[in-house]
Amino acid sequence: MISNFFMQLIHIELLTSYSVKDLLTLMRRDPRFDAKLVNDLFFEGSLIDENSHRFIADNIVSWLYERGENPDEFIERIVKRCADFEAVPARSVLRTYLPFVSQFYQTKDVRALCLETIPKRYPFLTHASILKDSTENDMRNMFLAFRFETPGALVSNPMRWILGMFRVGPLLLNTPAYEYMEYEATQTSFIEALEGRVEAEMKDGNVYIGNKLVGRTATFGECLDKLGFEWENTPERDVGCVLALEDLRDEKTNSVLLRKGCYYGTPSNILDVRFKANVITSEPFLKLMSTVVKQEFDAWKPVQKAQEQLLGAMNDSVEVVYYKSDDSISVNRKHLMRNVPARILRNLLREYTATGREEYENREFKRDPSICMDPLRPNFESRLNRVIAHINGTDEKDGNSEGVKKYFEIERHRRGGFRFLPKCKIVFREE
């Protein structure tokens, strides 16, 4: 179990930037999103397990991509909100710094101390150490090494999340942001970093996206030599990895997939941080304390209201029953459709309630003889149109005039496939 602190920042960003209707499309992606988990994300001091952390973060990234949004910009909004002290969980922040308060009042460089205390403030990071700390022309350069015992346990691609978490530290202590922070090496493999947005191919030790050369095989030792670092665990120098030769961005959202010069799949993460040296503030916790006071009054109310609205919407449910005796489906005990349209919806709901899946291919249904009896002339599209008409209330044949689209819809979002859009909890059974 780990602290919900950073997940709390993420959840607040969701509540402040998206409507309840939008958030329900995220919550319906996975049946593990329930009221208890949503409360654990919201309340200070809560703990969440690693599996929950992973499926939440991975679902958020996939959801943002589906919406055509850049996950990097999502995290940038969190960083900006922390800089502005807007809807920041101030008590949770103070709790993470309590063991180090006296150090931050005595330090000569707040931002350097933020990096030095990372190993103690984030216990899920292991083997954390400062590899280099130098100052030249009033600019300080620190290289931080850290690793996860099980890479990908908290999120498939933790690079952007960890970077965001480290970046907010100085901001919450009334200190300017780091001037530069980037990975030189990461445990995330180049395949995980691509996040399924493009397909890569390895040929003769080179990595190609289509016909474009984007990387080559290397060793961790090459990375260490380039940076000028010694490494105690000598065998790790021979571990293979991939060096990105080009910056690669997602065509649809412009999010960063690969960064030129970064080594992917290394035994340890190495972060390069540069900032003006000896920046301090006489009262690093002043804004945090002021925010705690304000949140007792007005500043926290909009976030609290959004949380209550989301939980209320999540608790709504609809009962859908498929009756084998007359091959029909009812919604909240009202007849909706029968025969082939009913079977299409039945098959869809079987899969959704079992796995949470929302994306479907037409060909899956065309192969089902109970839906398309003639494989040469399946005519599935017209049958799917009937299902959509029943849901929208535009097919009067079975006497359904209202439709059920307030509970769920089917969207033809691309050729050869469609998407199921649940708007509340769906309880499905067959009788």
Image (tube, helix red, strand yellow):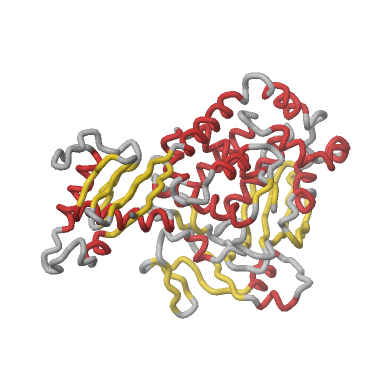
Q: Which of 55 and 387 is in front in this view?
A: 387
On the image, the x and y values in percent for residue 43 come to 65, 37
Name the residue at the bottom extreme.
204
Residue 254 visible in the current orientation: no
In this image, 396 relative to 404: left or right? Answer: left
Name the residue at the front extreme.
325
For the C terminus, the image quarter is bottom left
Please give the count of numbered marks on the rendered protein.
0
Taking the spot 46% from the left edge, 39% from the top edge, the residue there is: 23
On the image, the x and y values in percent for residue 289 come to 76, 27
Asked if residue 99 is positioned above or below residue 154 in the image, the reply reads above
On the image, the x and y values in percent for residue 256 come to 49, 53
In this image, 341 relative to 223: left or right? Answer: left
Taking the spot 67% from the left edge, 39% from the top edge, the residue there is: 177
Residue 336 visible in the current orientation: yes
On the image, the x and y values in percent for residue 46 come to 69, 43
Taking the spot 26% from the left edge, 52% from the top edge, the residue there is: 414
* Residue 130: quadrant of the picture: bottom right
Name the residue at the left extreme.
377
Q: Which of 86 and 411 is in front in this view?
A: 411
Q: Which of 370 and 419 is in front in this view?
A: 370
Asked if residue 283 is positioned above or below residue 348 in the image, the reply reads above
Q: Which of 393 and 192 is in front in this view?
A: 393
